[in-house]
Amino acid sequence: MADYQIINPYNGEQIEAYDFHTREHVEAAIELLKKGRVTQQGTPAFERSNILLKLAQLIQERKEDLAALITEETGKTISDSRVEIDRAYNTALASAMEARSINGEALDSDAYPPMREKIGVVLWKPLGTVLCITPFNFPINIAVHKIGPAFAAGNTILFKPGPQNKRSAELLVELCYAAGMDKSVLQMLVPDIDATSHAVSHRDIHAINFTGGTAAANAIAAKAGYKKMLFELGGNDPLIVMPDADLDAAVGATINQRFATAGQRCTAAKRLFVHSEVFDTFAERLVAATAKLKVGNPAEDETFVGPLIHTAAADEVEGRIQAAVAAGARVLFGHKREGNILWPTILDNIADDAELVAEETFGPVVPLRKFDDEAELVSLINSSPFGLQAGVFTQNLALAKRLYNQLDVGLLAVNDGPGFRAEHFPFGGVKESGVGREGVSYAVREMSYQKTLVI
């Protein structure tokens, strides 16, 4: 029997079965990538840029094929999958632009005594070989966020997609090769746990760029040794609605940033803090808008909420909802399940220490939390071990600035939700939400080092 079966999350049908790669495959791939470093050294910046431009074009040309694969593999709605491919196009395009503008600086040694009459030329150089590990929820765009900047910087890449995403990842790698990336520069493997551990600790892997969960990140960090690590981990991201908020805009952001992708994204609006002055009105409008969403087959254009990635994930989210309800939470909408589909669910009166809100919950559920006091709000948000992103709806710029200074997060979006992301903005959090920053130009530098020539 094969090691892994790719199961369609919506209908339960097996898509493919395959065996994981082994340590021997890892060794062979890394040996080839070592040779590829010479290839990268001989590939000028403009050529790397042109290859990434071609990749962007190919991604756009194969948009429907890539989107269909994502929907089959993950249950993401086809409309969401198409949006992801549009973002991946932008990421490849931004990587192409960045490849041409990786600039250093010149330093005058005589800024401090003694006088030495030297000039220091500081340039960015590639780290070597980067192990790029991606999750299931944005299998193409996150992969391009790793492969694009790593390639632009001049690295070679060992790409490990989520096992569910093998087919979409294979198509992406085919497009990379068709765009001009040499096979000695990019290798894809889906290794078993032992082989993955071997890759993580391998002396010829110089950096690890990982998106996923905290437990896996801790295991990687324990094995990696002295390597550059770029970790984009979980979040328990708050969306704050103040009395002066545009409530319709806040409702729209809540729906788009919590119920899209069935709530399975690190920046989803996972905790809704609504001021008591507008709480009832906001809740009423949110329920009315949620009731209009189409739930069901992710392959249909009109579907807004599809299934979770697998049964275990649906079980976990449903269990947290049931535990909250048993402890006194009130169901305002939803709390219905069919297979791996959880209907979008809205709750209030939830204890602050309930697992549903204290932990990162990867599913289409909105817990509403009434508040009055700004200091209490900040304390509640900062008590989380996570600190990825946050959003606030308000017209009060002074308040927004205070929250920006006080909240332990990597980004605060004003009059938008915590799910805001632009491919060229820095992306990452604090505390258990990760180490380092993605966002194309920032990722290039995370996967590079500074080297100085003194003349």
Image: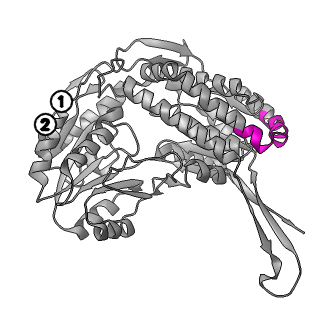
Left or right of 391 on screen, residue 444: right
Give yes or no for residue 410 being in the magenta stretch: no
- Given residues 396 and 218, the one toward you in this image is 396
Q: CA distance from mark 1 to mark 2?
A: 7 Å
Q: In the image, residue 233 lies at what x, y percent? A: 47, 47
Residue tagged 2:
288
Q: In the image, residue 359 lies at what x, y percent? A: 33, 48
Residue at (25% x, 64% y) in the render = 377
- Report the magenta stretch's main SS: helix
Q: Secondary structure at mark 1?
A: loop
Residue at (35% x, 14% y) in the render = 11
Give yes or no for residue 41 being in the magenta stretch: yes
Kindly indicate the quadrant of the structure image that contains residue 186: top right
Find residue 292 and name its label: 1
Please say whether residue 450 is visible from this viewpoint: yes
Left or right of 328 on screen, residue 116: right
Q: Relative to residue 182, is residue 237 depicted above or below?
A: below
Residue at (80% x, 35% y) in the render = 36
Q: In the image, residue 127 lies at what x, y percent? A: 74, 49
Count the numbered circles shown: 2
Q: Relative to residue 80, is residue 273 depicted above or below?
A: below
Q: Relative to residue 109, is residue 212 depicted above or below?
A: above
Residue at (61% x, 25% y) in the render = 58
Label 1 close to label 2 by CB (< 8 Å): yes
Identify residue type, mark 2: Ala
Residue lying furthest bottom: 113
Q: Magenta region: which residues?
A: 33-49
Kindly indicate the quadrant of the structure image that contains residue 263: top left
Q: In the image, residue 332 lies at what x, y percent? A: 12, 39
- Given residues 403 and 422, the one toward you in this image is 422
Q: Quadrant of the N terminus?
A: top right
Q: Secondary structure at mark 2?
A: helix
